[in-house]
Amino acid sequence: MKYTLAFDVYGTLINTSGVFNTLQQIFGNQATLFMETWRNKQLEYSFRRGLMEAYTDFSVCTKDALNFSCNKLSINLTNHQKEALLHEYTILPSFSDVADGLDNLKQAGHKLFAFSNGSEKALTQLLTHAQIINKFDGIVSVEKIRTFKPNPLVYTHFNKETNSSKADSWLISSNPFDVLGALSYGMRSAWIQRTPASVFDPWGIEPTAVINTLTDLSSALEKTNN
């Protein structure tokens, strides 16, 4: 069976740790803590805005989370430094397994879509810089419906935009909240456990498949057909 595949972008295809080198130059030993605080708060702000029905562009969540991280860790950055860090978020690299993994899936006949909380403009820029945009059949952003994952309306929007159904689509993500959102909606979902330290939320709901790299996905999809 050929599937319509929804690929989360940030943290799944694109390595948000790509900003680490710049953070290390600025913060030294505090770079890891700052990076984790920034990323976690970025997601939290999108969750909050979704619940409050107070949508804004995901880049605003990123900027607000950066300011929070500075305040939380008592770090003073100039406006120029903040702008430089926010720019880094637009040119992050893809993980090393992504290009080959997407090529394998494309050759197998599946339809591939980038599916993200980010705006279409930001995603186009990011995927273009990472040199993987031509591997997708399209981009599906939440901006049309003005809410964020894991709201079930977002996954419904994906199926509508791609002319697919719950039965023939998969969500692929390294973010457990996204996997759980898709499963709760009724899609199948593959969790990419990129490091042994990554932990899936113990909600009694398991991913349809667990893989370590994107190149493992083709075989995981074949197993579900057997």
Image (spheres, rainbow, N blue to C red):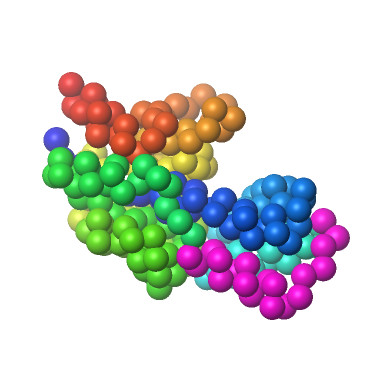
Placement of 180 over or under 16, stated as above or below: above
Q: Position of residue 186 (x, y in %)?
A: 35, 39
| Residue found 25% across the figure and 34% down from its top | 218
Toward which corner of the image does residue 210 lie, by quadrant? top left
Identify the image quadrant of residue 116. Answer: bottom left
- Is residue 145 something that shows in the picture? no
Q: Is residue 82 magenta?
A: yes
Q: Nearer the viewer, residue 119 or 146?
A: 119
Q: Is residue 83 above or below residue 117?
A: below
Residue interval drawn in magenta: 73-91
- What x and y, as percent, mark residue 10? 48, 53
Residue occupying the far top of the picture:
226
The front one of 68 and 78 is: 78
Specify whether residue 52 is painted magenta: no
Residue pictured at 39% horizontal, 35% vertical: 213
Q: Residue furthest right?
A: 74
Residue 5 in percent (x, y) is at 28, 46
Horizontal and vertical percent position of residue 19: 59, 57
Please tell me which residue is depicted at 28% across the width and 44% down the height of the picture: 100
**In the figure, 133 relative to 81: above or below?**
above
Residue 128 at least partly seen = yes
**Which quadrant would the C terminus be assigned to in this image?**
top left
Q: Quadrant of the N terminus?
A: top left
Return the residue found at the far front.
25
Q: Is residue 108 above or below residue 82?
A: above
Between 225 and 198, which is closer to the camera in this rendering? Answer: 198
Q: Residue at x 51, y 38 (%)?
A: 176
Q: Is residue 184 left or right of residue 23?
A: left
